[in-house]
Image (cartoon, helix red, strand yellow):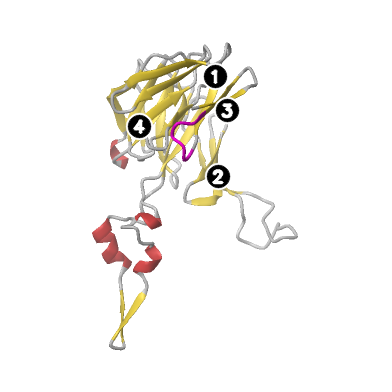
Amino acid sequence: MVKFNPRDDKEVLIAFSNKTMLHYNLFKESADDTDSNGNSSVATLVQEYTHHLASVFCMEFLDRAKKEEEINGIPVSHFTGTTDNDNDTTEQSLDTMTQNTGYKPEEPLYFVSSSEDKTLQIWNLKINMPIKQIADPAQHSMSFLVKHPTKNYFVAQSTDNTILSFSSLKAEKFKKVRKKTFLGHNCAGYGIELCFTPDGKNLISGDSFGYINCWDWTKCRLVKRLKIDDKVISSVSCHPLETSLVCAAGLSGKIYLYS
């Protein structure tokens, strides 16, 4: 699995079946090893993460920092601009705006990883040791992870035919939300993907018996179960703008688009 850094598209995180995850910078800063267009032809290893005990299944970034344009609708670049008033130049400090808006440019970037060792591990991207491990004797391995559009939660596809929810509101308190468990589908033995509708109101999953399953996120209730194929539906994806459009594919080689 490969994931791009949501804050820097020059960096990627790659998961391997040999228990490791590698963080690469795809563009070297020096002029060495560049092609005719000036782009680097050598990726630089930034960090290595090796604390899982088995193959890594999935990773998901948990970026909780607000985007630049989300600070009261004003870009951060405007906060450091200058205004003229009677020939006196007044600079509006970004630190002052940080106190008023809650924006934290230094907010660490976290990511979560799942593995065949039946654990979830929370990482700070800059540190090669997990800051938290979520494990339980009754816990099964989780084949797929996806975060909620609000970035306050992420869910995991557990191989015991359940979908588990976890809170990501505070970095030091990533924990399971026991009241948000989703049942009614089959995924044991397969890496079935999950997705949220853009408005975050519905959670959608594939199925090992060829179904598309849709749950109400708030009530954790299965609201729709649609049979679309005789083989496994392993991949689902929602349209980024139209909340009613869902694309699905599986082992039959067919791609379905449903409204």
Upstream in the sequence, badge 2 or badge 1?
Answer: 2
The reply to whether the C-beta atoms of the residues labelled 3 and 2 are less than 8 Å apart is no
Position of 117 with respect to 39 (left or right) is left
- Looking at the image, is 106 positioned above or below residue 247? below
Q: Which residue is mark 2?
A: 12
Q: Main secondary structure of the magenta part?
A: loop
Residue at mark 4 to residue at mark 3: CA–CA distance:
34 Å
- Taking 46 as reference, is 235 above or below it? above
The label nearer to you, 2 versus 4, is 4
Q: Position of residue 175 (x, y in %)?
A: 30, 31
Tell me the tag on residue 233.
Answer: 1
**Foreground residue, 125 or 170?**
170
Q: Is residue 100 magenta?
A: no
How far is the residue under mark 2 from the one under mark 4?
30 Å
Q: Residue at x 61, y 50 (%)?
A: 26
Q: Amino acid at mark 1?
A: Ile
Residue at numbered disc 4: 201
Q: Nearer the viewer, residue 34 or 255?
A: 255
Q: Residues within 10 Å of mark 4 (few under 14, many from 20)?
A: some
Residue bearing mark 3: 17
